Image (cartoon, rainbow, N blue to C red):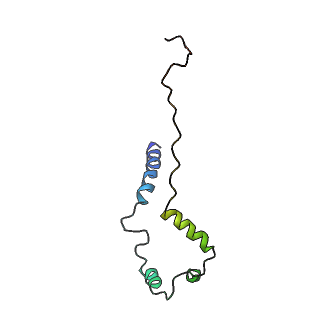
């Protein structure tokens, strides 16, 4: 009974070992499928030939100009430094 339980517990490790392959890809050995795809006359999607792209050219040009010449960053906020006594005491003086 103990031998069966040990064998059952160790069989889970074998499943993970079998998932590792000694080939470059999982599709290694599918040369017939590869050759049929390599000899396809036009493998691209027909919509890939569509050169008429809907959009506004002036807006696209403005975006391109924004990347080419970015606007200057905003100025840093003004820092006010008071160097004199203001007449208020906090008890530490």
| Residue 23 sits in quarter | bottom left
Total marks shown come to 0
Answer above or below: position of 34 versus 64.
Answer: below
Q: Is residue 35 above or below residue 29?
A: below
Q: Position of 59 compared to 73: left or right?
A: right
In the rendered image, residue 58, in percent from the top left (x then y), is placed at 60, 72
Of the pair 71 and 21, the residue shown nearer to us: 71
Please state which of residues 55 and 43 is positioned toward the viewer in this rendering: 55
Q: Residue at x 61, y 69 (%)?
A: 59
Report which quarter residue 89 is drawn in.
top right
The residue located at (43%, 60%) in the rendering is 19
Against 50, residue 72 (above or below) is above
Judge from the rendering whether residue 62 lies leftward or rightward of residue 33; answer left or right.
right
Question: Which of 9/19 is in front?
Answer: 19
Residue 40 % position (x, y): 49, 86
Q: As drawn, is 37 to the left or to the right of 47? A: left
Residue that appears at 51% across and 46% down: 75
Seen in the picture, residue 49 relative to 26 is either above or below; the reply is below
Residue 10 at x, y = what percent? 43, 49
Q: Please report the residue visible at 48 percent of the width from the left and 24 percent of the height from the top.
A: 83
Tell me residue 48's x, y (percent): 56, 80
Quarter holding residue 56: bottom right
Most foreground residue, 88 or 44: 88
């Amino acid at each position: 009974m103990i031998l069966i339980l040990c064998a059952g517990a160790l069989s889970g490790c074998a499943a993970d070992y079998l998932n590792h392959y000694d080939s470059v890809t999982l599709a290694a050995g599918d040369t017939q499928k590869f050759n049929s795809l390599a000899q396809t006359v036009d493998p691209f999607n027909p919509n890939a030939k569509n050169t008429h792209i809907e959009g506004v050219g002036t807006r696209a040009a403005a975006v391109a100009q924004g990347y080419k010449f970015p606007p200057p960053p905003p100025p840093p906020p003004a820092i006010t430094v008071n160097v004199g006594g203001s007449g208020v005491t906090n008890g530490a003086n």
